[in-house]
Amino acid sequence: MNFLFVALGGALGAVGRYAISLIPVKTEFPILTLVTNIIGAVLIGFIAGLASENENASPQAVLFWKTGVCGGFTTFSTFSLEAYNLLGRGFYFLGGLYVILSVAGCIAGVFLGKKLSLLFR
């Protein structure tokens, strides 16, 4: 049954990621993937914060949101390929900037999500 919760959440997350990718943006910098990863980091931090502070949190709900939705939504494999492609095409500044902003932004996003979860205790 847990697989069903993960699968349903993953489908929802993947649809959300796809919807963001449809936003028309013309730039070499993979801004939509960066934004998706930061939103996903905030969301997973929020969920983890709520789950850790609520002993009555449903394990199935946590699987649905954290593993399913966030796993289907975030795009770290896409991030890795885009960073590799930027660097491989000689866009060293953009590639390095993208890696730094992605990692720092997502860590900050988890921190923000955890703090936001405190408002919902």
Image (cartoon, rainbow, N blue to C red):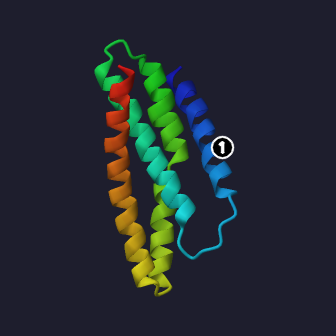
* Quarter occupied by residue 14: top right
Please say if 23 is above or below 66: below
Q: Amino acid at mark 1?
A: Val
Task: Please give the residue where the numbered disc 1 appears in the rendered image.
Answer: 15
Using the image as rendered, state which of residue 99 and residue 114 is in the foreground. 114
In the current view of this chain or complex, which residue is farthest to the front? 119
Please say if 41 is above or below 89: above
Please indicate whether residue 20 sits to the left or right of residue 92 in the image. right
In the current view of this chain or complex, which residue is farthest to the bottom? 90
Q: Residue at x 52, y 52 (%)?
A: 36
* Quarter occupied by residue 48: top left
- At which x and y percent is residue 2? 50, 23
Please indicate whether residue 21 sits to the left or right of residue 42 in the image. right
Q: Residue at x 53, y 31 (%)?
A: 6
Q: Residue at x 60, y 74 (%)?
A: 27
- At which x and y percent is residue 26? 65, 72
Q: Quadrant of the C terminus?
A: top left
Using the image as rendered, state which of residue 70 and residue 42 is in the foreground. 42
Count of numbered tags? 1
